[in-house]
Each structure stands twice: as C-alpha cells, then as structure tokens.
Image (cartoon, helix red, strand yellow):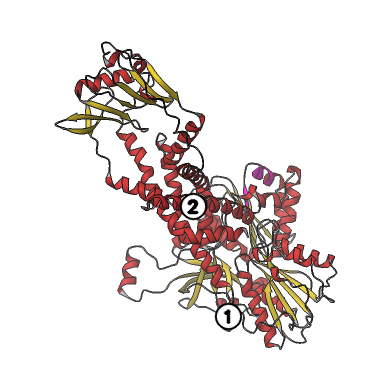
C-alpha cells in the first residue's frame, strides 16, 4: 500500500512536478540577484522621512516609493506626461538604473503558480503541492523501511543504479521538498479562501484630515520613526492638495499619515494570521530570505531526475514480473508456489522453479504470498520463496500473508518449504522468511525441507538448493536461473602470477586489459586516455559465463578501471567450470565479462582507520583498496594463507605498500607451517589494539569464505565484548561490511 501511495501519484503528476520544479528554480534566483544589486543600510540608519526627502529632491513628481523584500528601492514619478520608474540608492536618493519588470520572469511566475491557465491552473498547482507532500512523506517512510529503521537512514544504499540515485537524491533534498510542498499548499489554500491570509484587515479610510500648512516630508514624525528596513510602500498625496494624506505600509502594519500634523491615522496593525501568511510566503519564495530561496531551488532542481528514475524503477519492476505460462488453478494444483518480493527479483527464481516442476509433470500454481488461499484441495507441496524488506519486514507482495494465514480453513495443509532471499550484510538477514517459518509451524503446517537462504540473489546457491528437491520428486531436479545480464566486454589476458601448487591450492592473479582497438575511433580514444575498460572500482564484481553453463560466476575485483587493467584472484576448484577455464588461459587469450557494481563493499570516505580481514583469494579486493589508498589513511590488513613459501598472495606488492605507507600494518597467518595459525587467531592476538581502533571510529571490511567470515565474527565479538559492542552493532552503524562466498 505504501509503495502504491508513492508510485501512483508520482507517475500521474510527474510532468506537472517537473514544470513546477524548473519554474521554481528560475524564480529562486530572483531574490538573490536582486539582493546583489540592492544597497541595504544597517538598522536605524535611514528613516523613511530621510529617504522620501532625498527622493523628492531629485524627483519632484514622485508619486510612490516601494521597497522590495530584497532591499531594492523603487521610485515611481511623473514626468513628461507619463509615469516613470527607477531604482534608487537609499543613501543618496539618486537613480541606479531604470526599473523595468522582466516580462520573462512574470511569465515564469504565472507558469509556476497556475500553469498559464488562470484559476483552474492555480487549483492544479495546489494539487501538485499536495502530491509533492505525499511523495515526500511516503518516500521517507519507504526509505526508513528499506534501510531498516530511522537510525539507519544514513547507511549506504543498495539496489541498481536508478534505485540508488532515486533514494540518494531523495534523502538529501527531502527536507527542502517538504518545506516547499507545505508552504505551497498553505498558499494555495489561502488563494481559494480555504484559510485566511489576514489581508482583509485593512485600515479605515480617514474621514477627515487636519487643515493648515503642510509639513516638509523630511520632518514628518510618523515617517521619521519608521526605519527603512521595516518599510514597504509610501504613496504620496496629490501635489499641493491640502485634503490628501500619505498611505504608509510597513512590515508591522498599514495606515495613513496626515500631511499637516505628520501623525498616523487609521493605523491597522497586522494580525497574527497575516504575519503567519507572510512568513510562509517568505519561506516559499525566498523573498526576504534570499539564501533560503537558493537552498530550496537546489532542492527542487533534481526533481526531473527523480521523476525519470522513478518512472524507470516502476517500468523495471513491472517488466521484471514474469508472465507465467501454464499456471494451473489453485483448485487443481498439486504444488503451490507463493512469492514474497519487493522489487520483483524473487519472481525470476520462482519462475525457474515453476517451469522445472511443470516439466516434471507437476500441476503448479504460482502467486504472490498475499494471495494465500483459504484452501488448497489437491496441493501436496507448498513452496514459499520470499525476500525480506528493510529491518526484517515483509516485502510488498507478502504484507498481508500473516493475516490470510489466520483464515486458512482447508481440511488439510500441504507440507511446505521456505527459501529466503536477502543480503547477509543486513543484521536481520532473511528475517521475514524465518518469521514465516515460525508462523506456519505455529499453525500446524509441516515442513518437508529445512529453511534455506540465498545471499544476494546467488544463482549458484539456488541451483544447490534445487539438488535437495531430487528425493522429494523422485529424481534429479535441476534449477537453472539465468538473470538478465548486462552487456559484456571483451578482455585480453595480459599477465598472470601463479601460486599455491605446492599446497594443492592452485591460485592465480589474473590481469586483463582491453582488446586491441579495431578501428580508428577506438585508436583515437586510446590516444586521448580512454583505456577501453568499463567503469569499475575495487570491490565490484566481474561476471564471467563459462562454457557449458548459462549461469555467470562472479569474482571480486582487485583493481579499478582507473588502474588501466582488470584484476582478479582465482583459486582453481576441482570440477569448477569457470575456475578451470580461467586457469587454462594463456597471455593473449580473451574472455567476455560484465561488471556488477558492489558499492556496499568498499571503504567509506573519510580519514577513519580501516581494518581489512581476509583469507585466501579474499585478499584480491583488499589489495585493491590498499593500492588506491594514495592519501595514506591508516589501513591494517589481517590475512590468512597456507604456506608463505607457496601462496603468500600479493607479497611483493604488500611490501611495497608498507614502504610507501599505503598499508600501515600487515598481520599474516599461515596454517600449513609449524605452529601454524589462522587469521582469526591474529585478530584475537590483537584484540586490545583492535578495540582501540574501533573506539576511534575504525571500520572493518571482511572478504573470503563464509566459514572464515563466521570465525572472524566470533573473534571480533570476543574482542569487542569489553566495549559492550558486537559485529551486529558495527553493522547497524555501517562500519562492518562483508563480501563472502
């Protein structure tokens, strides 16, 4: 419901919001530009009487003096049979240029306020402000859920390019959007008299004035006591008229000034409602607060980008929902598959399971978890494939599942199996899948498989889970999920360094470069410094599809594209299609690969210390982080291998980094030597020092096998216990990140 509240109004009003945003940005510049040209004296330096006297000396036919919120003083005077307008310097009363309101800015203001459509357009503009308010509030709530609570709003964002940009921009500008929307909505309501703006409280027109000689304007008491910075407008009486009076408007109130006695008559102070309206007007327009106008202009400037990325996200979500062929009815189905998904990625896995079971002769019904029926008369098996949203919450297609489970009334309950999808870097990894498991058990449902989880949409883990289905369905069950892959790039092996043969762990550091340019354009690009590589950073992933498999294998990158090469560290796995292929490459041979960004695994910006922990090939991205540490921030590396004589990966480079201070300290552990140890032992040995680093704000990045990462967590929890902290605490603070395999 919350996602629909956010997406539907955004889709409907995207064009209107873009127009409002662009015109608002243009209008936000006006107060600042006017301020640059205005001369603003200090408080109590110039009175209105002094200003009027100076102006009257230079412009005998003066009719009106105005002061804009920016401080510009405008004089209207008669001369040569017509009314003229000039901007004047309040310090001298002399002209600083003719005053000619911009026709273009008037058009922009009309576009912003009414879409050039008069009163109906003003109503649409008010509705646009309401929609912007709904989008801002719902966007904040969605982001809170996505990040796992209010305290996690500043955590690095996850998702694809459009999702990250949409959310990142949103959380930066949301307060400006809320202020613009609220103030715009208030002003629209005042326009249509839904609320009062206080302008109806005007001073009474004087019934009579004093008679006698007229006071020189420079001596009028009411004008002498009015400071220029409080002044808004002074209208002069008809020249030589003894029955006229001055009309004075200030920031505190309005009234008339007797030109004979010089006192205020029929004065009307502004009401609280009027003051509130004018304050809100100032907040919205920046008139009188030019710096705020610029800030609000910067806040609404990205709205076109927000609209485009929002539409793309909606389209990608819609397109990614599979159209399942041969979806049996729930009454006839032998197998039920229910899907819990936020961004529809889980549906791809569900479709693969659906199609595989159909090929084995099963009648399969697949639907969202929110469509849990009250009875499945012929179902023997129930699969639930679900992601977790935010801080352990249900995804959008499963937020009604628990309530519907209470209403299940069928005479029998099919046995179930749950497969959870999530990101292990979240503290509540696959929590909703676990909650669903508990709820089904409490209601008497029986599992036929233990709860399983998939980390970061791993097709390999999904295939391994499918192997467990063989005994259930009396034969091999092969699950091949092929995600939509980005465009591949051709790369050429330019060097390799081999390790580990002596300890039966062959490992190679493979360095690839772009293939030789094939045409004049490519050669020209190389000459001007464009290296022909896609953009990537150390810690990102490279996907390689081995021969004989549609499923890509991913390797963490040990380099960034600015290094001019793509580097990975690969251990040869017995029977591994991709690792054996890579280990069989010779210099000059080519592969096709694509980049998958992994922005959540890299050191955060800033000067805080970084603790890198890894084992085996997990050193690859860690070495890349150290290589790029040209600012020489403190970096401490803990790494485990087998034997320093055979598989001390990156040893020459690490020694170089120690020398030039890109690496502060190296702690290596080797398990196949006399009195060998593991990397977690080194962590425990340095527990006191690590606590000190954590207390000073250090972050930890871990890369390697899942078993190693588990051991590291145990060691770190032991080391951090005296501080009352744990790995989970650091995760919540965004100071503990993993890349495990």
For the magenta stretch, what is the residue range? 690-700
Residue plotted at (69% across, 56% down): 427
Quarter that holds the N terminus: bottom right
Percent x, y of residue 515: 41, 74
Mark 1: secondary structure: loop
Return the residue found at the far top: 212
Q: Quadrant of residue 365?
A: bottom right
| Placement of 544 over or under 99, stated as above or below | below
Q: Residue at x 42, y 29 (%)?
A: 202
Q: Is residue 602 visible?
A: yes
Question: Image height check: is 432 above or below 347?
Answer: above
The foreground one among 481 and 124 is: 124
Label pair 1/2, CB-CB below 8 angstroms: no
* Spot occupied by residue 252 in the image (x, y as percentages of width and height): 44, 25
Q: Nearer the viewer, residue 480 or 125?
A: 125
Check disc 2 and report the residue beneath it: 127
In the picture shown, does residue 521 fall above or below 308?
Answer: below
Residue positioned most to the front: 207
Q: Is residue 696 magenta?
A: yes
**Where in the figure is residue 589, as x and y percent of width and height?**
47, 78
User: Is 274 rendered above or below residue 517?
Assistant: above
Q: Is the residue marked by circle 1 packed among few (<14), some (14-19), or many (20+) residues within 10 Å? A: few
Report which residue position mark 1 lands on.
550
Q: Is residue 211 left or right of residue 153?
A: left
């Amino acid at each position: 419901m919350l996602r629909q509240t956010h997406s539907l109004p955004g889709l409907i009003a995207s064009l209107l919001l873009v127009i409002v945003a662009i015109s608002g940005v243009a209008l936000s510049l006006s107060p600042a530009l006017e301020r640059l040209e205005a001369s603003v004296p200090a408080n109590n330096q110039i009175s209105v009487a002094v200003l009027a006297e100076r102006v009257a000396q230079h412009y005998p036919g003066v009719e009106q003096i105005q002061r804009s919120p920016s401080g510009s003083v405008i004089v209207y005077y008669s001369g040569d049979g017509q009314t003229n307008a000039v901007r004047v310097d309040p310090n001298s009363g002399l002209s600083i240029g003719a005053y000619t309101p911009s026709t273009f800015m008037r058009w922009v203001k009309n576009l912003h306020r009414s879409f050039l459509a008069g009163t109906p357009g003003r109503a649409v503009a008010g509705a646009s402000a309401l929609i912007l308010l709904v989008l801002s509030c719902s966007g904040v709530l969605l982001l809170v859920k996505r990040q796992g609570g209010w305290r996690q709003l500043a955590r690095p964002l996850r998702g694809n390019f459009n999702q990250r940009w949409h959310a990142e921009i949103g959380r930066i500008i949301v307060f400006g959007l809320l202020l613009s929307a609220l103030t715009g909505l208030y002003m629209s309501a005042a326009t249509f008299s839904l609320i009062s703006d206080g302008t109806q409280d005007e001073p009474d027109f004087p019934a009579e004035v004093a008679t006698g000689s007229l006071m020189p304007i420079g001596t009028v008491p009411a004008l002498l006591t009015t400071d220029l910075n409080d002044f808004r407008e002074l209208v002069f009486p008809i020249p030589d008229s003894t029955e006229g009076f001055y009309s004075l408007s200030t920031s505190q109130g309005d009234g008339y000034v007797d030109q004979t006695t010089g006192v205020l008559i029929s004065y009307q102070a502004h009401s609280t409602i009027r003051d509130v309206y004018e304050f809100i007007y100032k907040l919205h327009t920046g008139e009188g607060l030019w710096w705020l106008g610029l800030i609000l202009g910067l806040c609404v400037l990205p709205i076109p980008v927000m609209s485009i990325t929002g539409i793309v996200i909606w389209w990608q979500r819609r397109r990614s929902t599979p159209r399942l062929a041969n979806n049996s009815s729930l009454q006839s189905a032998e197998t039920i598959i229910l899907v819990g998904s936020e961004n529809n990625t889980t549906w791809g896995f569900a479709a693969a399971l659906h199609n595989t079971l159909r090929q084995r002769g099963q009648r399969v019904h697949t639907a969202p978890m929110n469509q849990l029926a009250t009875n499945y008369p012929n179902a023997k098996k129930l699969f639930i494939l679900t992601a977790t949203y935010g801080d352990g919450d249900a995804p959008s297609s499963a937020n009604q599942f628990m309530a519907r489970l209470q209403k299940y009334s069928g005479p029998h309950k099919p046995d179930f199996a749950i497969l959870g999808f999530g990101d292990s870097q979240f503290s509540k990894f696959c929590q909703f899948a676990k909650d669903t498991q508990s709820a089904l058990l409490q209601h008497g449902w029986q599992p036929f498989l233990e709860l399983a989880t998939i980390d970061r949409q791993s097709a390999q883990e999904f295939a391994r889970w499918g192997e467990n289905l063989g005994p259930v369905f009396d034969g091999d069950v092969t699950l091949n999920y092929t995600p939509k892959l980005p465009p591949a790039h051709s790369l050429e092996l330019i060097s390799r360094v081999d390790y580990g043969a002596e300890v039966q762990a062959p490992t190679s550091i493979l360095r690839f470069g772009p293939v030789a340019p094939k045409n004049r354009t490519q050669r020209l690009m190389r000459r001007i410094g464009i290296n022909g590589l896609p953009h990537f950073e150390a810690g990102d992933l490279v996907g390689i599809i081995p021969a004989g498999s549609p499923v890509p294998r991913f390797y963490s990158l040990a380099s960034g594209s600015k290094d001019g090469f793509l580097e990975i560290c690969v251990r040869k796995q017995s029977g591994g299609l991709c690792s054996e292929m890579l280990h069989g490459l010779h210099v000059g041979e080519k592969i096709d690969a694509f980049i998958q960004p992994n922005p959540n695994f890299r050191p955060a910006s800033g000067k805080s210390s970084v603790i890198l922990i890894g084992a085996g090939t997990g050193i690859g991205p860690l070495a890349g982080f150290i290589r790029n540490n040209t600012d020489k921030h403190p970096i401490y590396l803990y790494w485990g291998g087998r034997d320093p004589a055979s598989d001390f990966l990156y040893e020459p480079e690490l020694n170089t980094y120690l020398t030039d201070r890109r690496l502060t300290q190296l702690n290596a552990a080797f398990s196949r030597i006399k009195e060998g140890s593991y990397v977690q032992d080194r962590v425990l040995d340095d527990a006191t020092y690590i606590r000190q680093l954590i207390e000073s704000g250090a972050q930890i990045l871990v890369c390697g096998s899942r078993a190693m990462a588990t051991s590291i967590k145990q060691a770190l929890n032991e080391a951090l216990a005296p501080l009352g902290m744990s790995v989970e605490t650091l995760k919540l603070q965004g100071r503990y990140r993993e890349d495990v395999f």
